[in-house]
Image (cartoon, rainbow, N blue to C red):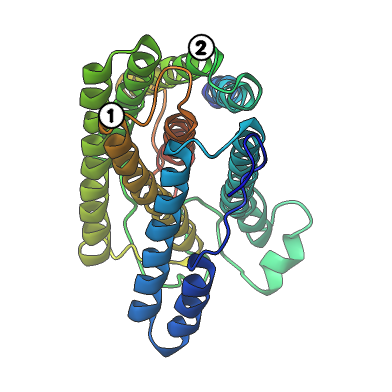
Amino acid sequence: MAAAGAYYVPHGTKWPIVGSFGMLFTLGGALVGVATILFMVFGWFGTVIRESVAGTFNKQVDTSFRMGMIWFIFSEVMFFAAFFGALFYARALSVPWIGGEGDGALTNFFLWKGYAPAWPTNGPSEIGGAFETMPAWGVPLLNTLILLSSGVTVTIAHHALRAGKRKELLVFLGLTVLLGATFLWYQAHEYMEAYTQMNLTLGSGVYGSTFFMLTGFHGLHVTLGTIMLIVIWLRCARGHFDRDHHFGFEAVAWYWHFVDVVWLGLFLFVYVL
Amino acid sequence: MTTLIIVAFLIVILYNLGAGLYYMMSDKGQTDRTLNALKRRIGLSVLLILLVILGIWLGIIKPHDLGR
């Protein structure tokens, strides 16, 4: 056991080797590998939660968790910046270039004659065939309102935690989970409609690929956020947090706000503008 | 012009989101600064979307369509 007040270092844990085997198993088949990795994630995080509740972590460990959050968010910001960057590059630069703007006059004349730049587009070769775009005034707007409402409910839950109102915290955190799940349900339907009725697919040129990469990875983040909110709801129900000690809650609540802001950017730049 | 207003809103929203993260690191859950920054961020986001809805409804903002 570590001395009181020292930086806690666990002595002996099986989770790293379980994770390593999980990665090895993905070579044989995704299902077994991913299942093993999920087992590792839940087991490892569960161990850390039990260590935290047992009071083994000092202030320095707390700072480490907060630093970990910063780096995680930094990588997330870079990740979405790359995809938003691809969207802006295609829309504002490369599509106008092949349409003859700027110094692209000869490119347009010799390679893409007659192509008039526009957005949305699947390019001069019309990769993926004719498609319809997803109108903003429908499911996307509904999903925006759902996600914004979940941002409001998570803020109310946060306020309740700081005010020491447990019941309010659980009710509004629970509502946030439900709103997140509803968002995902509508997005799945939007994708089915895009594929079956609008011929808007991942292969619909630059519009289709940026559309599905951005909204798809955002949806994945909503899925992850919803799972994290469920875990935090269970931890709140078990009384793991109080008004002064709630980093787990705060980090996940902040992550939910982050995912919400990414959607705002998506809704505005992919669907509306 | 509408794009500029929307981008200005997004910058202020991002600033408040970032401030929330910064206060999470510096105050370690002991103050309400993170919560208050996140309250400003959600308030501004709701206001922005309501304005966009109003803009589409009044025809000031036209969501893009094919070939436009």
Indicate the quadrant where residue A4 lies: top right
Secondary structure type for disc 1: helix
Expressed as whole percent of the image width and height from the top left, the position of residue B40 reads 48, 14
The residue marked by circle 1 belongs to what chain? A
Question: Would you place residue A219 above or below residue B31 in this image?
Answer: below
Furthest residue toward right: A103
> Which residue occupies the foreground of this view, A269 or A83?
A83
Q: Secondary structure at mark 2?
A: loop
Q: Which residue is mark 1?
A: A173
Q: Position of residue A107 (x, y in %)?
A: 72, 67
* Placement of A34 over or under A116, stated as above or below: below
Residue A51 location, x and y as percent?
47, 44
Check the image and report above or below for B57 versus A75.
Answer: above
Q: Residue A148 placed where, x, y %? A: 34, 27
Looking at this view, is A161 or A75 the one in front?
Answer: A161
Label number found at residue A121: none
* Residue at 23% from the left image edge and 44% from the top image edge: A181
The residue wearing badge 2 is: B32
The chain that hosts pointer 2 is: B
- Residue shown at 21% from the left, 19% from the top: A167
Quadrant for residue A180, please give it. top left
Q: Is residue A259 visible?
A: no
The amino acid on which the numbered mark 2 sits, given as a three-letter code, is: Asp
Cα distance in 3D space between marks 2 and 1: 18 Å
Label 2 packing within 10 angstroms: few (<14), some (14-19), many (20+) = some
Q: Is residue A122 above or below residue A141?
A: below
> In the image, A91: left or right of A128?
right
Residue A171 figure quarter: top left
Q: In the rendered picture of this protein, how many numbered marks are placed on residues?
A: 2
Residue type at the position of mark 1? Leu
Camera-side residue of A57 and A131: A57
